[in-house]
Image (cartoon, rainbow, N blue to C red):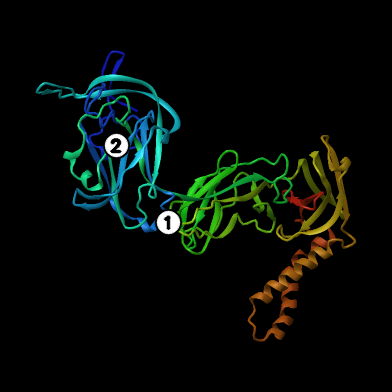
Amino acid sequence: MFETGSRSGNTAYLAPDYTGSMEELINSYVINRGTDNVFINTGGNTTNNIERFDLTLASPVDVSRYNPNTSGFLLMERNGNDIFKVSAITGLSGTTVTALNTPVTILASNWGSTGYNFESVVMQRRVTGTVTDTDLKPSQNIGLQNISGVFVTLAQLGITSGTLYGLSFFGGDVALTNAQLLNIANYPTNTSETPNSYGIDFMAGGGFFTRAVLIKGAVWNDANNNAVRGSGENGIANDLWANLVNPSGAVVSSLKVNADGTYTVYVASNNVVTGDYKVILTNSEKYEGALLSVADNPLNGYSFTGVNINGVANTSNKSGIINLGPIYQPIYDDIADVSGIDFGIRNASLPITLGGLNADISGEQLLVKWTTLTEKNNVAFDIEASLDGNRFTKIGTVNSKAINGNSDESLHYEFLLSLDTNNLAFVWGGLAFACSLLFLRRSKAAGMLLMTGIVVVVSVISCTKQDAGIEGKEEKVFIRLKQINKDGTFEYSKIIQAVRK
């Protein structure tokens, strides 16, 4: 992204994205910011006459809190082919560096490419005699180069305890003792670009980083409802977010599940605390520090089918939460990531394509009709009835007409029940019993024997009005289908009301 400096007709003159300090450069994430040949004093296309530059941290780091093998500085360069030296700042008075560790040499072979390439133009204020340009002017077209990086650990910097204030950088040709490094007058002033590439072309994007504990898993379409990812059961995002929650119930990291169902959440190794961590799925991002204890119900008709932790299935956990237990990592041990934290979800719609469902009451008979357009691994349908639309009771079963439970053609079903024989009496009895239990739960413990007697009376009084359904005269009878799969799992259809003719 460049700023438009001026425009003339259809020609736009782009202003360079100028950074006035190395601090601003390192803390920036704008890709077209960088430097060229920082330490070059003589020869080459660009000379800067800079012998050393120091980057001090806004807040000093207590090194003992970090794993020295996995914490350190990421440094970025254009093309990744320069040699330089870096030293840890271990003493600082105001803005003056008072102590430096033994330097580490970064070779051309230490750089690693990010895989991203771009073209750049070097802009300079040229000095001619005693005159210095007031404006930045193009100096050279660098052409296409890759962005490279190198990670320098605290262990490489030779600092495993005490306080770290920042880093000092200087040319690869500097050969001085730690004490001599503090005096800039000791540095060579004839550093050249060739043959040893001592220039260093720093880029934005670096900084202090520490290794994180990664928790990896996936969300998949658990078609057979068994919390085991089988053949053809693909990963699915369904707009879910994975959240890592610490033992205090606060969100540590919140990241959207990838399109293929995979996700990764993390916690910095130095921030790991004792106690149980959890992964909780939600339908939106949760900000760091927010309290979170309950998962969201998945969108688009999906529901949780269970979890699978490193190959161990658990169909009873349909909460959208996995308890990871403690993630304790001793500071100086290698950090082990956690993987195989998987969630199964499934669309709650029937594993059949239902073409239609209706029911009617004619005289003293209840007739339920339905059509399936397709069926897969279907065994049977339980027909369930309710007098209040909430509590259902099975009133019959019809086996699947599909061969081996599978069909791609329309199949028609009917279920007929005579109401004059009191076939719905058990439906009513179940409701009456439920009323009794409800009343009993609301009673006090004292006088329980007396209250039990009252319950029976109240049950009859409160539910007698619906008793007409037993005789086929009730205006409201609710029906639903319970479709049963070969593996014993089941799904419910929508609820309909029987129509009286």
Residue 494 horizontal/vertical position (percent): 72, 48
203 vs 251, left or right, is: left
Task: Decide: is 37 above or below 342.
Answer: above
Task: Decide: is 425 above or below 301.
Answer: below
Name the residue located 60 percent from the left edge and 39 percent from the top edge.
260
Judging depth in this view, the residue of 278 and 74 nearest the camera is 74
Amino acid bearing label 2: Leu
Residue 23 horizontal/vertical position (percent): 26, 40
Q: Are marks 1 and 2 in contact (CB under 8 Å)?
A: no
Judging depth in this view, the residue of 238 and 244 nearest the camera is 244
Q: How many marks?
A: 2
Question: Crowding at label 2, few (<14), some or many (≥20) Cα neighbours within 10 Å?
Answer: many
Judging depth in this view, the residue of 313 and 177 nearest the camera is 177
Under circle 1, the secondary element is: helix
Q: Would you identify the image quadrant in which residue 430 lies? A: bottom right
Q: Residue furthest left?
A: 130
Q: Is residue 465 visible?
A: yes
Q: CA distance from mark 1 to mark 2?
A: 27 Å
220 vs 134, left or right, is: right
Q: Quadrant of the image for the N terminus? A: top left
Quickly name the residue at label 2. 25
Q: Residue furthest top?
A: 9
Give the label on residue 486, or none.
Answer: none
Task: Decide: is 10 above or below 120.
Answer: above
Judging depth in this view, the residue of 458 and 244 nearest the camera is 244
Under circle 2, the secondary element is: helix
Q: Is residue 289 visible?
A: no
Residue 149 horizontal/vertical position (percent): 40, 36
Name the residue located 66 percent from the left edge and 75 percent from the top edge.
441
Quickly name the residue at label 1. 270
Q: Would you identify the image quadrant in which residue 369 lies? A: top right
